[in-house]
Image (cartoon, coloured by chain):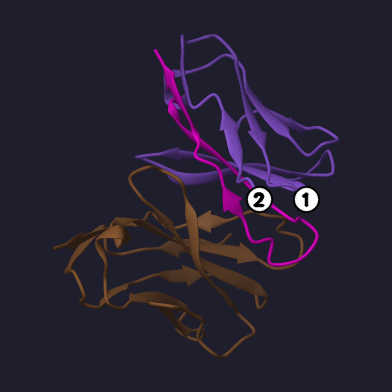
Amino acid sequence: AQTVTQSQPEMSVQEAETVTLSCTYDTSESNYYLFWYKQPPSRQMILVIRQEAYKQQNATENRFSVNFQKAAKSFSLKISDSQLGDTAMYFCAFMKGGTSYGKLTFGQGTILTVHP
Amino acid sequence: KAGVTQTPRYLIKTRGQQVTLSCSPISGHRSVSWYQQTPGQGLQFLFEYFSETQRNKGNFPGRFSGRQFSNSRSEMNVSTLELGDSALYLCASSLGFQQPYEQYFGPGTRLTVT
């Protein structure tokens, strides 16, 4: 079974600064995908960024980027130029390739607060 | 495109009753997954349906069941409700036939069992 661990229950950052959220996972699979989801106080879960395990290049999406360390089984999210709208719960999630058929395994989440 | 919709948004039920929640996926999406979110257990996978067939199932008791219709809309049912079933139930849709099955979530149904 796969496990996902987010060791930072809460984090805070000043507007315009950079923050990094940590995530580690445990799996024996070689084919898998990793995701970061954002859940603002309104509760709608939004996909932030995705990383395929077979890709060495770290994914980026505007102000969001990941540091994917496959050997260390680490998948951190960096948010640059933080904005007030980034305030949310962030979840790291794992999906096995092949026949996982839409099953995401989530970490416990990190509450990020961006202060003006 | 319209996003994933879930109805109802809020529900209050009494222990022992049953409940049915509904999820309409994004147009063109054929897969619907269901998750339970609680403060204690976090987000847990319930099951996934594709083309009216359950393809994957999490570790929940048989009181939790689901189905999918030919238009890809999905329902989940919880029978004999327990206090511990109080949670936010999220559904997510994806194309379902192309990895990595990128999922788009609905706003959730908040179920309170008293």
Quadrant of the rendering where the N terminus of chain A is positioned: bottom right
Asked if the residue under mark 1 is in contact with the one under mark 2, i.e. CB atoms within 8 Å, the reply is yes
> Picture quarter containing residue B100?
bottom right
Amino acid at pointer 1: Gly
Chain bearing mark 1: B
- Residue B28's disc is 1
Q: Residue at x 44, y 78 (%)?
A: A62
Chain shaded purple: B
Query: Which residue is labeled 2 in the image?
Result: B1
Using the image, name the chain to which the residue with label 2 belongs. Answer: B
Give the residue drawn at x 25%, y 78%.
Answer: A18
The span picked out in magenta is B86-114
Which colour represents chain A?
brown
Looking at the rendered structure, the kind of residue marked 2 is Lys
User: Horizontal and vertical percent for residue B42?
Assistant: 42, 45
Label of residue A29 in the image: none
Q: A104 above or below A31? A: above
Of discs 2 and 1, which sits in the foreground?
2
Q: Is B74 situated left or right of A5 in this image?
A: right
Element under disc 1:
loop
Sequence order check, earlier mark of 2 and 1: 2
Residue at the (61%, 63%) spot, across then down: A95
Q: Is residue A20 left or right of residue A93?
A: left
Image height of B88 relative to A23, above or below: above
